[in-house]
Image: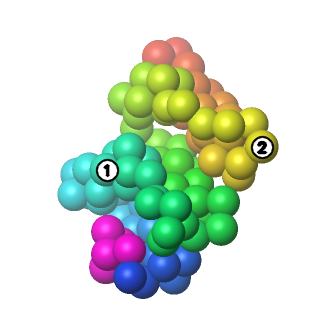
């Protein structure tokens, strides 16, 4: 359902809920959604699904996602940018705490 674009913006809340499951399958799905761009004809306002996937990846908590997010091209004017910055802050903080333990 999350990858089926015919469901439009309704996929966004589902992405957030899935991130709480913290399974390898969900991690892979989030990475896939982040890499995909909505075609202009189907674009959810401001690519909401992608922004939610970025934020969910931060909540997922796997520091391995830091490089993926850091290299992600996003425009400052889109919600994806703020989602990426928030996710990176969370992941870097978690990684720093993990290294201290």
Q: Which residue matches tag 2?
A: 77
The image shows residue 20 at horizontal and vertical percentages of: 44, 64
Is residue 75 rendered to the left or right of residue 50? right
* Left or right of residue 28, residue 98 in this image: right
Q: CA distance from mark 2 to mark 1?
A: 22 Å
Residue drawn at x 38%, y 74% as measured from the top left: 5
Left or right: 96, with 22 as reference point: right
The answer to which of 97 and 55 lies nearer the viewer is 55
Q: Secondary structure at mark 1?
A: helix
Residue at the limit of the structure toward the top, as seen here: 100
Residue 32, numbered label: 1
* Magenta stretch in the rendered image: 1-5
**Residue 51, horizontal then vertical, whole percent:** 58, 54
Expressed as whole percent of the image width and height from the top left, the position of residue 21 reads 36, 65
Across and down, in percent, residue 85 comes to: 67, 35
| Secondary structure predominantly adopted by residues drawn in magenta | loop
The first of marks 2 and 1 along the sequence is 1
Give the answer, above or below, for where 63 lies relative to 99.
Answer: below
């Amino acid at each position: 359902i999350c990858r089926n674009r015919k469901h439009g913006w309704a996929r966004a809340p589902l992405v957030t809920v899935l991130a709480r499951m913290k399974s390898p399958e969900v991690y892979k799905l989030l990475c896939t959604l982040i890499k995909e761009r909505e075609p202009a004809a189907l674009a959810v306002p401001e690519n909401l699904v992608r922004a939610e996937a970025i934020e969910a990846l931060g909540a997922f908590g796997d520091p391995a996602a830091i490089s993926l997010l850091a290299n992600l091209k996003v425009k400052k004017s889109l919600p994806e940018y703020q989602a990426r910055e928030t996710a990176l802050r969370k992941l870097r903080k978690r990684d720093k705490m993990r290294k201290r333990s």
